[in-house]
Amino acid sequence: MPKWKRTLVLILLTAMVIPPIVFSAWAWVTLHYVYARGERAGYIQKISRKGWICKTWEGELAMVNLPGAMPEIFSFTVRDEGVAHQVETQVGQRVSLTYEQHKGLPGTMFGDTEYFIVRISSVTDLGRTSH
């Protein structure tokens, strides 16, 4: 095989192998590195499983600061099926959501948002939480 053909084959193989490796490494790092952790309290407005191929749980939390004020909507993603079912049972209830923020995720196959819910707690009228 002539040298130019070997070089061409090597370039083509490299172009086919390197991008998937880089994409996989990028996805792994962004899914395992937590940029921020926190909690948000409010009322679960909705939770739904959506997506064409990669199904994800997506939801909204309405956060009301003052009576009569417009609620701020916090959109979130749930990756754990167990937590998603806990969120489903709390729709319309006041809850506290513990989240992890993952910046730089490649595309929307891991979720529509960068906020992943890891725990949900019910909030009682006295402001105390129960797990």
Image: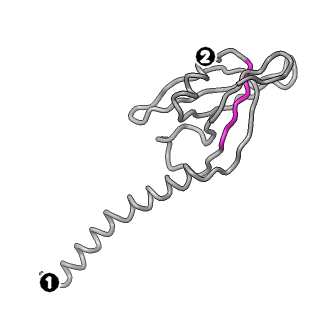
Report the magenta residues as a range.
Answer: 94-100
Q: Which mark is residue 2?
A: 1
Question: Split into 4 quadrants, where in the image is the C terminus?
Answer: top right
Residue at 67% x, 28% y: name it: 120
Question: Split into 4 quadrants, where in the image is the N terminus?
Answer: bottom left
Residue at 53% x, 33% y: name it: 80
x, y percentage for residue 45?
A: 66, 20
Q: Residue furthest bottom?
A: 3
In the rendered image, the vertical position of residue 22 relative to residue 49, given as above or below: below
Residue 91 in the magenta stretch? The answer is: no
x, y percentage for residue 31?
A: 55, 49
Residue at 71% x, 28% y: name it: 73
Residue carrying label 2: 89
In the foreground, 110 or 15: 110
Badge 2 or badge 1: first in the primary sequence: 1
Q: Amino acid at mark 1?
A: Pro
The answer to which image quadrant residue 22 occupies is bottom left
Tag 2: Cα neighbours inside 10 Å, few (<14), some, or many (≥20)?
few
Question: Disc 2, disc 1: CB below 8 Å?
Answer: no
Decide if residue 51 is on the left or right side of residue 37.
left
Q: Amino acid at mark 2?
A: Thr
Instruction: Please tell me whether mark 2 or mark 1 is closer to you in this view.
Output: 2
Element at badge 1?
loop
